[in-house]
Amino acid sequence: MSKLVESIRFLEDNLKKLIYEHQDLKVKYRTLSTQFNSENNSISELNSKIEMLQKENKTLRTANAMLGSTEYKRETKLKINSLIKEIDSCIIQLAE
């Protein structure tokens, strides 16, 4: 009988340990989940900033090209050609 009682106590102790570890893991999971969501939001904000800065960079390159910078001579020519095509298209539409 003593072995049976001892086994039951052993099982109770192990069960209590498991319950405690389970509760501890639940708390850690909540903390990590919150941190993950926070990091996800930060990543989204940074991605949008990157996108905005890329657009701004493109705009500045175009403006620099339009000013006739020697560094962007090719881009300047391409931009002028595209503007001429747009103007021609508008003239054709007005003529109709």
Image (cartoon, rainbow, N blue to C red):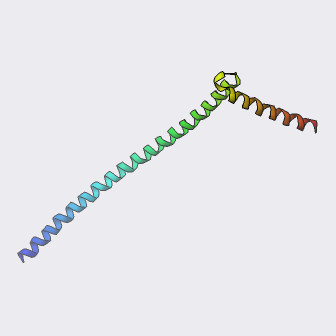
Q: In which quarter of the image is residue 53?
A: top right
Residue 55 relative to residue 27: left or right: right
How far across and how far down the image is residue 4, in percent? 10, 75
* Residue toward you, 48 or 89: 89
Measured along the vertical axis of the image, is residue 43 above or below residue 78?
below
Q: Quadrant of the C terminus?
A: top right
- Residue 23's place in the image compared with 74, above or below, is below
Q: Residue at x 68, y 26 (%)?
A: 73
Residue ranking furthest to the right? 96
On the picture, is 84 further left or further right than 39?
right
Quarter occupied by the N terminus? bottom left
Q: Position of residue 94 (x, y in %)?
A: 90, 35
Q: On the rendered structure, is 22 left or right of 57? A: left
Which residue: 61% across, 34% down? 55
Q: Is residue 66 left or right of residue 23?
A: right
- The x, y position of residue 23, in whole percent, is 28, 57
Residue most toward the bottom?
A: 1
- Residue at the (17%, 67%) spot, across then down: 12
Percent across and percent down for residue 80 are 76, 29
